Amino acid sequence: MWRVLHRDWRIDAAAGWLLGFAPTVYLALSGGGYDIVARSEIGIVIWWIVLLGVIVGILPRVRLGASAWIAIALLAGFFAWTWIATGWSQSEEQTLAEAARVATYLGVLVLGLSVMTRASARTLLLGLASAIALVSALAVLSRLVPSWFPTDTTANLYATSRLRYPFDYSDGVGEFAALGLPLLLFAATGARSLWGRALGAAGLPIVVLCLAMTVSRGGILAAAVGLVCFFALVPDRLPKLATALVVAAASAVEMVALLHRSALRDTLGTAPAGQRHSMLVVAVLAALGVGLVQVGFSLAARRWRRPRSLVFSRRGAAGFGYLVLSAAVVAIAVVIATGAAHRLWEEFKQPNPPKAGNQYFRLLSVAGSHRYQYWQVAIDAFKSSPLKGIGPGTFQFYWAQHQTLGEFVRNAHSLYIETLAEAGIVGLALIGGFFAFLLVAGSVRAIATVSDTRLPVATAVAGIAAFCAAAAFDWVWQIGVMPLIAMLLAAVALAPVVERLPESAGTRHRLDPGRIVLAVGAIPALWAIIVPLSSTVAVRSSQSAVKAGHFASALKDAATAQRIEPGAASPRLQRALILEQLGDVSGASQAISQAEAREPTNWQIWLVGSRIATEADKPALALADYRRARSLNPTSPIFHA
């Protein structure tokens, strides 16, 4: 019996670490998982594992509790509402892509809850911490040793000296790194082995340096929220605070070194080798130093008992926590009463932080970088359809028609405000309720737990809080790797973390309502992911065939995409462009008309339609299509050249 339990414990531990590490690294190095292909591949694999595991009888590992089912129900409700929204959306194609996104995240949550045991909970957090530390280290190396990377990591659509590899988005990289801080603190202070604690501590200054090099205010906010929640919820805070202070000292050395290397800090291209290599030495020494100090802390804790003056009772710690919370409430009240909150809000409305020679001066400003303007348009979209919204994935069309900045924007830079605009009150209630439930239920569980499960649960809740803070001010919901991390943390926060007992063959294959629900739910989730993915792959294959001059193959692929997703506009747009190149203006006109009917607020389709109508010698139709395109994006420089 003991050998069986030990073997199963090792299997659970390995599965937990792999689940945390592998998909995180894969998506992070695939542009963050923003692209539908990389994200959907993960979703399909995960849902197949769930389906086959349930059929065989090995999933879920333990019976899911009420909290787990409530979380699944809320996120599944959001998935269903997103899918239903295709009935009124401005673009069925874009809305189905959003349904596929939510289906993938739901699969991650379900699989995480299904595999969770006491062993896998801890190792899953360690796997996530390892993945974030690895990706953050690669991000830093992309600036310090760019020759190690096959592509030019300094090229971008817009000029910036901020670190943005591997997502091609600085704020996203910073917010990703911020999620790693509570996880690495967990590894540094809660890992079973001395090596694990040393490596966890060594990863912290690397992640902090990555965050600093992105100059991301959203990342700093997420880091602050995550750390506050971590120290508010974890047990035995004193040794964790000691580790944090050592990390802070090492990070301060890194910051001083970075600020004194102006070319590395502010150069758009590759900085001089001397500054890059010396900064690398500083980063390596900081990591080694923190790791060695943590080894010393761990050995000292094993050999010497802590003095009574440094041992705090649960009641005393709670009293101190209430005191800190009261001080925070008083400080907020003072800020509001003195008018500072109003001044900060007025500054947030400003489009951009003031320009300065040193990019780190942007951290002293709370200017919203156009977020206030994005949110204004999103609120107007909500007011046009408050209950059900304009349709998930279609904010980009509403923005183009109603904005005044003359820039292209796809997302509203806030999960909650964008959901309110696109999915209405119902959508916000579901996704907002989901994250609120995770935070409340996880916090209650962490506070109420006195066993060794408190630290993993508290760490998971801190990571979720950091994600929620980032999601309030940025489009992290669309950066697939970050919601994946949040869903795995949700599994740790809510799953019944108990030792799994071996099941008899009869018990394993017994009809269980929970398993039936998971098996049945996997079918529509897989369909929702596979259809948009297959259509996208077919369209991209058609585009590649056009570049190669294989027009017959291109038309075939476009027709395949059209059959897979009949309500999509992009296959018909692709077919129209191919036929236009081939000189079949009549066929192109028919195809572009079908595309216009399926995405009536997409100005780009109408502009293509105007060109094709001109080629068909239909000037009245061409003028009408052109005017329609201009009305859908009136501030675009295309129409004011």
Image (cartoon, helix red, strand yellow):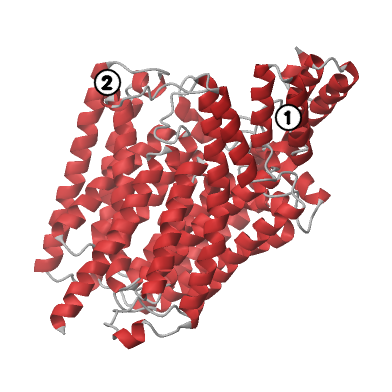
**Relative to residue 567, is residue 193 drawn left or right?**
left
Q: Is residue 280 above or below residue 613?
A: below
Amino acid type at mark 1: Ile
Q: Is residue 53 above or below residue 396?
A: below
Secondary structure at badge 2 equals helix
Figure quadrant of the C terminus: top right
Query: What distance separates the C-alpha of mark 2 from that of mark 1?
Result: 49 Å
Which residue in the rendered view is the most extreme toward the right? 620
Residue visible at 26% across and 46% down in the picture: 203
Label 2, on which residue? 275
Which residue in the rendered view is the most extreme toward the top? 641
- Camera-nearest residue between 230 and 391: 391
User: Callout 1: 10 Å neighbours few (<14), some, many (20+)?
Assistant: many
Whole-percent x and y of residue 590? 77, 30
Label 1, on which residue? 605
**Relative to residue 465, is residue 343 drawn left or right?**
right
Amino acid type at mark 2: Gln
Residue visible at 52% across and 75% down in the picture: 517
Asked whether the viewer can see residue 338, the reply is no
Residue visible at 39% across and 61% down in the picture: 230
Q: Is residue 200 above or below residue 299?
A: above
